[in-house]
Image (cartoon, helix red, strand yellow):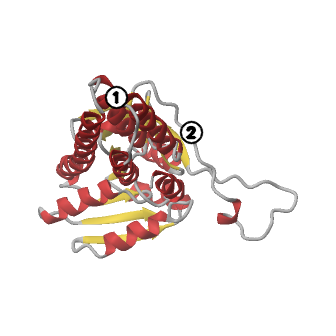
Amino acid sequence: MIDETVDEIEEMQTHSSSVVAVKAARALRTLTEREFPSVDEYLRGLERNSHALRRANPSHASLHTTQRDIVETVREAEPADIETARELTEDAVDRVIDQVESAKREAADRCAELIADEETLLTHDYSTTVLQAIETAVADGASFDVYVTEARPRFLGRRMTRRLAATEGVEATLIVDSAAGHYVRECDRVLVGMDCVVDGTLYNRVGTYPIAAAAADSGVPTTVVGSHSKLIEGGFAFENEFRSSAEVMREPADGFDIKNPAYDATPVGLLDSVVTDREIRTY
């Protein structure tokens, strides 16, 4: 089961990091169904399988923080027997999943209040938290014009545009990534999700950095929204992912290289605010 989930996580390129974290937590719960000769063997199995899940996607901070939380919770309790270790694991998994799902909802609600009085937004990539924030604001009476970038690689912005276009009260327009600087001047705010913020740097879908830079130059605030668990101070080294060159050009590259990074780094100094389930941080 866990080997299968590791393979699935490695292929989950169009899912949010919170979805990946929940899937990995549920996979780790399956260890409670296995037989182990001792508590020490159980704990070693828990750590080994958790490490494999984390390595399946080293760019997702929430995957790492939730897995580490589960393992440390069980280890630090020093279970006297395997049955206790199983119960601790199940409780930790349930708690982590609840925290991930409630944090997304609370962050979106807080963000909805922030954008409620604005008319034109620009967003990048496909973020379920951004989507929920806009839908919540619309349900409370707001309406928006939203520019959505195509968001390479894998054109996830198309998916976001379709969802927004189906939302009453939203006029959605899909634009190519390179046009963001052209349209940002028409916007009241740039609103994006986050993979993680590590030691003062936002890591998100590639293209976020030039959008934030263009917005800052144009005097348009950029807001990032996501769960507080994605804000990391030390203990996590972000690893970028480089996608297949076939996503850029189908024919073979003759005499040149193709680089297709999935994420880029944006200094938080370019941001106006980071909205989480706990707070709004301003910069």
Question: Residue 175: horizontal and vertical position, in percent?
Answer: 48, 67
Amino acid type at image mark 2: Glu
Q: Quadrant of the N terminus?
A: bottom left
Q: Is residue 16 visible?
A: yes
Q: Is disc 1 placed on a helix, strand or loop?
A: helix
**Which residue is rendered at x = 22% and y = 63% of the image?**
135
The foreground one among 14 and 119 is: 14
Question: Residue 88: horizontal and vertical position, in percent?
Answer: 25, 36
Q: Is disc 2 placed on a helix, strand or loop?
A: loop
Q: Is residue 151 left or right of residue 111?
A: right
Residue under numbered circle 2: 239
Tag 1–tag 2 contact (CB < 8 Å): no
Q: Quadrant of residue 200?
A: top left
Q: Residues within 10 Å of mark 2 (few under 14, many from 20)?
A: few
**Which residue is rendered at x = 79% and y = 54% of the image?**
257
Residue under numbered circle 1: 72
Q: Is residue 138 left or right of residue 45?
A: left
Q: Residues within 10 Å of mark 1 (few under 14, many from 20)?
A: some
Q: Nearer the viewer, mark 1 or mark 2?
A: 1
Q: CA distance from mark 1 to mark 2?
A: 23 Å
Amino acid type at image mark 1: Glu
The foreground one among 71 and 32 is: 32
Q: Is residue 183 above or below residue 55?
A: below
Q: Quadrant of the C terminus?
A: top left
Q: Is residue 275 visible?
A: no
- Residue at the farthest front position: 37
- Residue at the farthest left position: 140
Q: Mark 1 or mark 2: name the one nearer the start of the chain.
A: 1
Residue 161, numbered label: none
Q: Is residue 126 left or right of residue 57?
A: left
Q: Is residue 120 above or below residue 60?
A: below
Count the labels in the image.
2
